[in-house]
Image (cartoon, rainbow, N blue to C red):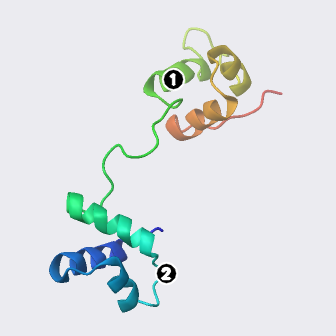
């Protein structure tokens, strides 16, 4: 269950000040789409950490879009100053670096802020 920031703040205040549990919160707010298991998880987190925010580094780790791979793709995607016209296509970069084509495309688009064109 995903809680909005306002919902999490309200739940935290009611837990800290009045000691509300999951069942009491469900009874007090019948219009909210809260589940007992979601509330229990959030209350356990509030009791342990005292915060409603995510822990830093708790998300999925980046495996392909690392700084090393971004630098490698940047070298291949742009023409060198002393050798104009030596840039590679997304397919060529993917084959050369063994990085998936979709990841190379995302690196070019999101990290390097460039647009990919097909060679004709």
Q: Secondary structure at mark 1?
A: helix
- Classify residue 71 as left or right of residue 54: right
Residue 53, visible in the rendered structure? yes
Question: In the rendered structure, which disc, 2 or 1, sits on the residue that comes first in sequence?
Answer: 2
Question: Is 42 or 54 nearer to us in this picture?
Answer: 42
In the rendering, which numbered label is found on residue 101? Answer: none
- Residue highlighted by disc 1: 69
Mark whose residue sits in front, 2 or 1: 2
Q: Secondary structure at mark 2?
A: loop
Question: Is 60 or 114 nearer to us in this picture?
Answer: 60
Q: Is residue 60 above or below residue 80?
A: below
- Classify residue 51 as left or right of residue 63: left
- Classify residue 101 as left or right of residue 36: right
Residue at 83% in and 27% down = 120
Count residues near mark 1 (Cα–Cα under 10 Å), then give few for <14, some for 14-19, many for 20+. Answer: some
In the rendering, which numbered label is found on residue 33? Answer: 2
């Amino acid at each position: 269950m995903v809680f909005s920031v306002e919902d999490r703040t309200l739940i935290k205040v009611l837990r800290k000040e009045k000691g509300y549990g999951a069942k009491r919160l469900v009874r007090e707010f019948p219009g909210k789409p809260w589940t007992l298991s979601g509330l229990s998880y959030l209350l356990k987190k509030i009791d342990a950490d005292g915060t409603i925010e995510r822990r830093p580094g708790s998300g999925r780790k980046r495996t392909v879009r690392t700084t090393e791979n971004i630098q490698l793709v940047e070298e291949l995607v742009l023409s060198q100053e002393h050798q104009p016209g030596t840039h590679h296509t997304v397919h060529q970069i993917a084959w050369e670096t063994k990085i998936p084509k979709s990841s190379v495309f995302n690196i070019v688009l999101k990290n390097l802020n460039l647009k990919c064109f097909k060679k004709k």
